[in-house]
Amino acid sequence: MKPLLNAAFLYLLVGVSSGLFYREFTKLNDFPEGQFSQLGLAHTHLLTLGFIVLLIALALEKVFTISRSRKLFAWFFWLYNAGVILTSGMLIWHGSLTVLGLESNKMISGIAGLGHMLVTAGMIVFFVALRRAVTAAAANAATEPVLR
């Protein structure tokens, strides 16, 4: 549970900081207000996929002890976090290039796509681990004697 809590807190700090960076970087470079840049998306990706999703995973871990399946849980944790970090990093890189008026390339989109694939794979592994934990909890509840 502690890795989930620590990662969620770290994503909170980085997500809020990325919003501050977005606001100040666009002002500093006289980027037109309201013009789209992927830089602003990093803020929401980090807070939603990092902070909120990991808090939900923490709550599910508390209820169902998903980490009982250690290998699956480790795969989820590392795949998912690598995906969030890679995706957010590419959003910041691409958005910064846009604000600076520089050309982007397909490599950035490709790496961001890889990040999204890792997030998806992590979510699938998490769901498999969650399904096992819920099934085990239901089986344990069915075998426990009922007190009357």
Image (tube, rainbow, N blue to C red):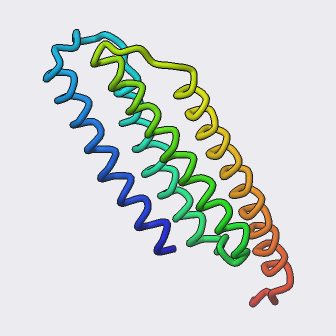
Instruction: State left or right for residue 92 relative to residue 22.
Output: right
Residue 39 in the image: state x and y as whole percent. 36, 27
Q: Residue at x 67, y 67 (%)?
A: 73
Q: Which residue occupies 43% across, 51% down?
A: 51
Is 11 left or right of 71, judged from the image as shown?
Answer: left
x and y percent of residue 59 in the render?
53, 64
User: Residue drawn 61% across and 29% down?
Assistant: 110
Total count of labels? 0
| Residue positioned 59% across, 61% down in the render | 77
Left or right: 111 with respect to 16? right
Asked which quadrant contains residue 9, the reply is bottom left
Q: Is residue 117 above or below residue 105?
A: below
**Residue 15 position in % (x across, y down):** 34, 44
Q: Is residue 140 above or below residue 97?
A: below
Q: Position of residue 53 (x, y in %)?
A: 52, 50
Classify the position of the C terminus by image quarter: bottom right
- In the rendered view, would you say 31 is above or below 28? above
In depth, the one of 99 and 146 nearer the eye is: 99
Q: Position of 44 compared to 16: left or right?
A: right
